[in-house]
Image (tube, helix red, strand yellow):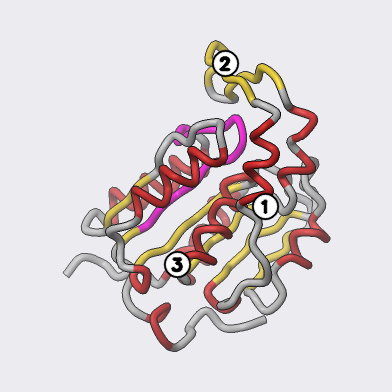
Amino acid sequence: MTSSNSSGPAALPITHVLYLHGFRSSPQSSKARQVAAIMATHYAHITWWCPQLPPSPKAAAALIAEGTAPWPANRMAVMGSSLGGFYATWLAAQRGCKAVLLNPAIDPARDLAKYIGEQTAWHDPAERFHFAPEFVDELRALEVGPMQHPERVWALIAKGDEVLDWREMTARYPGSHQQVMEGGNHALSNFETYLPQVLEFLHLQPAP
């Protein structure tokens, strides 16, 4: 595995951090809230953005691209969980920025095809949305090939993920730093245990 201390643009201090939640999830997920709390407490000088992503992958990609367009690629980082990890992979490929992937979805076009129709949000079952058939093609349009800067990617992968195959996840990011945990689950219930490693990889600088 490669070191997180890569040379070049990725070595510059991070000034902007983006968090992308997963399918049926939201900024209210446990992992998103944990990172948000750390950012607010220790890195308030760093721009933090955790948007609610629309169900349409095309619309989600447009929101992400527009929101981060002013951000300097060599000083930004993206974190993504599950489907958010797929989006984070796409953004990292576009911008060459650092990426932290948490049980990232590898082939969501395949996996989410069975969810076409009305869905409920995890954190608010009263909130419903429609996952349209064309969204599958929109996911395929966001697929990217091998990472051009694998050393700028850090992946946390649980062998006990009940939704995604950990073997697919590890195979997708050769040359990147991977923390593969025994057991665990898709939600990464013990995420707080690995937060120090996430922060070390991002190498966030405290306020001057």
Please tell me in which quadrant of the rendered image residue 46 appears. bottom left
**Residue type for callout 2:** Arg
- Of the 4 image quadrants, the one containing the C terminus is bottom left
| Residue 17 appears left or right of 169 | left
Q: CA distance from mark 2 to mark 1?
A: 24 Å
Q: Earlier in the sequence, mark 3 or mark 2?
A: 3
Camera-side mark, 1 or 3: 3
Q: Relative to residue 79, is residue 149 depicted above or below?
A: below
Q: Comparing marks 2 and 1, which lies closer to the viewer?
A: 2
Q: Is residue 150 left or right of residue 107?
A: left
Real-space CA distance between mark 1 and mark 3, rounded to the nearest whole angstrom? 21 Å
Residue at mark 2: 128
Mark seen at residue 95: 3
Q: Is residue 189 visible?
A: no
User: In the depicted view, which residue is nearer to us: 5 or 57?
Assistant: 57
* Mark 1 / mark 3, whichever is N-terminal: 3
Q: Position of residue 90 (x, y in %)?
A: 56, 58
Q: Amino acid at mark 1?
A: Asn
Residue depicted at 45% across the width and 67% down the height:
95
The percent position of residue 22, horizontal first and vertical second, equals 59, 40
Residue 5, position as x, y percentages in the image: 48, 83
Q: Please give the name of the residue rendered at 33% of the width and 70% of the height, measured from the top-left corner.
A: 75
Q: Label 1: which residue?
A: 103
Q: CA distance from mark 3 to mark 2?
A: 32 Å
- Magenta region: which residues? 17-28
What is the magenta segment's predominant secondary structure?
A: loop
Indicate which label's residue lies in the foreground, 3 or 2. 3
Out of 61 and 79, give the one closest to the viewer: 61
Indicate the secondary structure of the residue bearing disc 3. Answer: helix
Q: Earlier in the sequence, mark 2 or mark 1?
A: 1
